[in-house]
Image (spheres, helix red, strand yellow):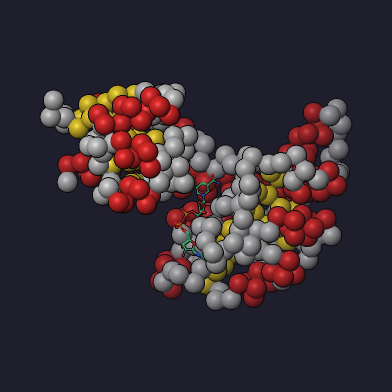
Amino acid sequence: SNKWKILVTEKVGEAGLDIFRNAPDAELDIKIGLTEEELTKIMPNYDGVLTRSGTTMDEKKIEAGRKLKVIGRAGVGVDNIDLAAASRRGIIVINAPSGNTLAAAELTMANMLAVIRRVPQACASLHGGKWERNKFLGRQLSNRRLLIIGLGRIGSEISKRAHAFDMEVIAYDPYIPQKKADSLHVELVDDLEGAISLADVVTIHTPLTEETTNMIDEETLRAFKQGAYLINCARGGIVEEAAVARAVRDGRLAGFATDVYASEPLSHDHPFLAEDIADRIVITPHIGANTVEAQSEVSRIAAQNMLLVLRG
Ligand code: NAD
């Protein structure tokens, strides 16, 4: 037929599948759990492939896809796709970076509240048969100063939610225009350590780049107010993990919450799993994008953009 043939290799949100099902010029094949050989073998049949993070679109498969014009990733990270091989063949790779913004922003707020009120620890204590009302003395977000490092999609959503909690919001982001900060009622501070020294709570929302790798290290940690809180729901590797664990241990940080790690999953001897700091750490296993709504959004956006590419 003269329809675009689309292969979906992983379980993605129904919204994206419906886009293909409802398109008069597309024909959908869903084949989940194929082996590498099986996938390579059927690759020549398809104009487009939609994946998540579990399908390795390596050079071999990309070369096998003689008709292939577009690879869609229902999500953000494209480390499972050989971008150089795709580019050599003129295949367009698209992802859906805005689809999980709200999910990540909401998890950040959840982790911020969890760490400042010690919700997971209080919950574990009660499960342990104890009733320790006085042990769990927290702090309030209200009237405290929040520093957002990286005022992009997620950072901007955090600024709105933090304002709703009556926080004063400042940001460090050398790459956004002043008027964006103004429109969010956020004060931009132009040096990182100066900004950190003003903050009661610091939350990170930058990508992982050469510049942001170990951005929060031994030295920047010394700039924190005694008893400040640090939240990372961006990428592992932006904070130097051993140094952060030490800052929690010596009390410089009153608490630390993170969803992401330099190497995932965690090794059993990871510094964040140390028992002596478990009281003041909140760790979640990279669940920032895991909501029904976000999975649906990323599949919808990826599918829509794949059709735009195919239709030229
Ligand atoms: P974005 O590109 O919209 O925003 C990133 C912001 O960081 C930009 O405004 C950019 O100017 C700024 N920035 C870049 N380098 C900087 C630096 N050196 N110092 C300060 N600011 C800098 O990205 P986003 O969609 O908001 O995502 C932010 C982060 O959250 C990314 O690392 C992304 O991978 C991560 N994320 C995590 C989850 C999760 O599951 N935990 C889910 C979604 C996104």
Q: Vertical placement of 97 versus 295: above or below?
A: below
Q: Is residue 275 left or right of residue 24?
A: right
Q: Say if residue 143 shows up in the picture.
A: no
Residue at image location 68% in from the left, 41% down from the top: 266
Q: Is residue 203 left or right of residue 103?
A: right
Q: Position of residue 30 (x, y in %)?
A: 34, 24
Q: Quadrant of the N terminus?
A: top left
Q: Nearer the viewer, residue 103 or 165?
A: 103
Q: Vertical placement of 181 versus 141: above or below?
A: below
Q: Nearer the viewer, residue 51 or 151?
A: 51
Q: Nearer the viewer, residue 92 or 207?
A: 92
Q: Position of residue 288 (x, y in %)?
A: 55, 43
Q: Position of residue 178 (x, y in %)?
A: 43, 73
- The picture quadrant where one finds residue 68 is top left
Q: Nearer the viewer, residue 274 or 46?
A: 46
Q: Say if residue 255 shows up in the picture.
A: yes
Residue at image location 44% in from the left, 69% down from the top: 176
Q: Is residue 13 left or right of residue 147?
A: left
